[in-house]
Image: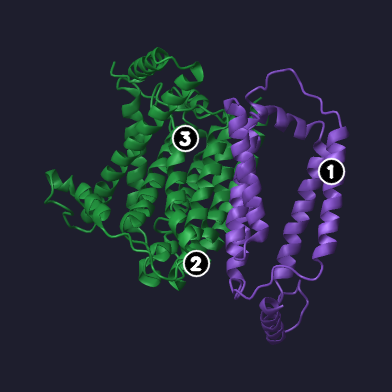
Chain colours: A purple, B green
């Protein structure tokens, strides 16, 4: 086995094991940390594919922003690390069936799709090309995604800002009570 | 005249011939060369930190009309080495109720993240471990692991002060990362390249320094970078008067030393990045390039120390408000104006 495939299998192993740990870990903070490890493994795979720009973007966006915000919300949630949290519910068989079916569909389509492999050696600076394509060929999807993200941002602000004129929920006392009730209800399921 | 690029090349050739003489292929040559380079970077970082700790103590002492450490070595120069030996000898205490795995890995992740930045910093002509073509983007993405380490430390310590410290650091670093990245983008618009080597080579003359073309961008970078380092006036994550020692409260001995090392490594790399992006990197007349780089970077470090011992600490709400309501709009405006100017000039 040559070096490249050795590194590939090491990274793949890291990614898969930490992804499994994300869903099976009892402690939700541990899950978040393993998620970061899995995302890091994927970034390593991008590096191996000679796509360093994608790798850096992956780490910057998923680890740097999304995972940190996840950890943030884990920390903000009351009694989240209690050992009484249940991991599964009565819908395990249904879930298993659906995910197995999805796996079969994905494997089938992967098997039957011809994936064109370019003979050209990868150029180092993918950033330039990527930027150009975003502003020419793929400008419409790019803009749509931007607007979507902006909308999500504004709606998050509106939801978070309960007692202001935008929230329209009336006086502060009532909202405080509601918030307390919601917080009390959440951890105990 | 005293350039080190020839020496580096010679050492690289010697390694190459040695490895080839042992009957190993070219892949091994690269591996061994990179390993040696990594070792050199680690030793360099250790020496820099030892010096910076001493210097910070001296600067703070002078600002407060004291003399600082004087006993060990010339003007206390060896004081940090004595302190390091003391820390190494200390018992490695793990409190009973900590989350062991995460508690163990947190200082390591923070330290490695701080060290990994040094790979892409051009210390001088030919003194660059790896000129990645995503250079500055690599630095931005690697430094995010620092936050993860701090959060892990804060959570696993099982201590409310540590948790609050970790919390604050996450909020702060995530918020200030945005204006920092935007201020760097202003320079990238001019350079058209993310590679650190390329950015340096575009600023050979004094008037070509990007600080003249991006003065506001530089100021935004300076403020945001100070916040990224968790240094005063933005040192809320470890504000000792309210949080004991923040996320490092439960750490002692070598693990504490790793957080400490990481903080000083970050301070140096922030100054080094500022030197590379805004002050012409290692370019300078007469004297060797590594001298210019170190001189500019150490001036930057001095400014950060000066901040720390002059300004009072901000409040949490002021800190966040400043990032989102002032720094971010300013950074966007700066980027917009820069883009317009570049478009007009072309």
To which chain does the residue with label 2 belong?
A: B
- The residue at the point 32 percent across, 34 percent down is B295
Q: Secondary structure at mark 1?
A: helix
User: Quadrant of residue B7 in the image?
Assistant: top left
- Please state, as top left, top right, bottom left or bottom right, where the N terminus of chain A lies in the image: top right
Whether residue A52 is situated above or below residue A65 in the rendered picture = above
Q: Which residue carries the number 1 mark?
A: A106
> Between marks 1 and 2, how big is the CA–CA gap?
48 Å
Q: Which mark is residue B316?
A: 2
> Between marks 1 and 3, how big is the CA–CA gap?
49 Å
Q: Residues within 10 Å of mark 1 (few under 14, many from 20)?
A: few
Q: Secondary structure at mark 2?
A: helix
Q: Which mark is residue B278?
A: 3
Q: Position of residue B268 (x, y in %)?
A: 38, 42
Q: Are marks 1 and 3 on the same chain?
A: no
Q: Position of residue B67 (x, y in %)?
A: 16, 54
Q: Position of residue A50 (x, y in %)?
A: 64, 28
> Is B324 displayed left or right of A136 in the figure?
left
Pick the front one: B142 or B33: B33
Whether residue B274 is situated above or below residue B190 in the rendered picture = below
- The residue at the point 58 percent across, 71 percent down is A81
């Amino acid at each position: 086995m040559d070096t490249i495939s050795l590194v590939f299998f090491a990274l793949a192993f890291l990614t898969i094991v930490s992804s499994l740990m994300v869903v099976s870990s009892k402690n939700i903070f541990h899950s978040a940390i393993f998620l970061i490890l899995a995302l890091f493994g994927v970034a390593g795979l991008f590096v191996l594919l000679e796509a360093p720009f994608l790798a850096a973007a992956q780490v910057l966006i998923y680890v740097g922003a999304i995972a940190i915000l996840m950890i943030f919300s884990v920390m903000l949630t009351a009694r989240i690390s209690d050992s009484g949290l249940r991991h599964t519910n009565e819908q395990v068989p249904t879930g298993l069936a659906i995910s197995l079916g999805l796996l079969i569909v994905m494997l089938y389509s992967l098997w039957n799709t011809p994936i064109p492999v370019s003979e050209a050696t990868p150029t180092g600076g993918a950033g330039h090309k990527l930027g150009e394509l975003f502003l020419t060929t793929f400008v419409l999807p790019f803009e749509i995604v931007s607007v979507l993200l902006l909308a999500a941002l504004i709606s998050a602000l509106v939801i978070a800002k309960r007692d202001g004129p935008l929230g329209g929920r009336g006086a502060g006392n009532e909202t405080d009570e509601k918030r307390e009730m919601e917080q009390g209800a959440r951890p105990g399921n | 005249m005293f350039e080190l690029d020839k020496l580096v090349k010679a050492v690289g050739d010697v390694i190459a011939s040695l490895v080839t003489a042992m009957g190993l292929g070219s892949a091994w040559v690269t591996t061994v060369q990179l390993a040696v380079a990594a070792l050199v970077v680690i030793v360099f970082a250790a020496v820099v930190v030892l010096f910076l700790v001493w210097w910070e103590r001296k600067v703070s002492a002078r600002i407060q009309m004291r003399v600082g450490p004087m006993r060990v070595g010339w003007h206390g120069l060896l004081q940090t080495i004595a302190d390091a030996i003391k820390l190494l000898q200390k018992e490695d205490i793990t409190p009973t109720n900590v989350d062991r795995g995460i508690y163990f890995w947190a200082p390591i992740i923070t330290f490695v993240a701080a060290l990994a930045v040094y790979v892409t910093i051009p210390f001088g002509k030919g003194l660059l471990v790896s000129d990645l073509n995503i250079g500055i983007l690599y630095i931005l993405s690697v430094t995010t692991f620092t936050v993860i380490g701090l959060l892990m430390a804060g959570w696993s310590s099982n201590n409310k002060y540590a948790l609050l410290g970790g919390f604050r650091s996450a909020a702060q670093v995530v918020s200030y990362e945005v204006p920092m990245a935007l201020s760097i983008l202003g320079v990238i618009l001019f350079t058209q390249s993310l590679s650190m080597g390329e950015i340096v080579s575009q600023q050979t003359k004094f008037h070509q320094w990007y600080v003249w073309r991006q003065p506001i961008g530089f100021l935004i970078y300076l403020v945001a970078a100070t916040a990224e380092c968790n240094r005063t006036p933005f040192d809320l994550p470890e504000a000792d008067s309210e949080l004991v020692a923040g996320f490092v409260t439960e750490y002692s001995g070598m693990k504490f030393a790793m957080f400490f090392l990481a903080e000083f490594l970050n301070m140096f790399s922030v100054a080094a990045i500022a030197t590379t992006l805004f002050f012409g990197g290692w370019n300078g007349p007469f004297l060797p390039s590594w001298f210019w780089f170190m001189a500019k970077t150490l001036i930057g470090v001095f400014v950060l120390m000066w901040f720390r011992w002059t300004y009072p600490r901000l409040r949490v709400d002021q800190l966040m408000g400043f990032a989102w309501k002032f720094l971010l709009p300013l950074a966007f405006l700066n980027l917009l104006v820069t883009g317009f100017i570049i478009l007009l000039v072309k």
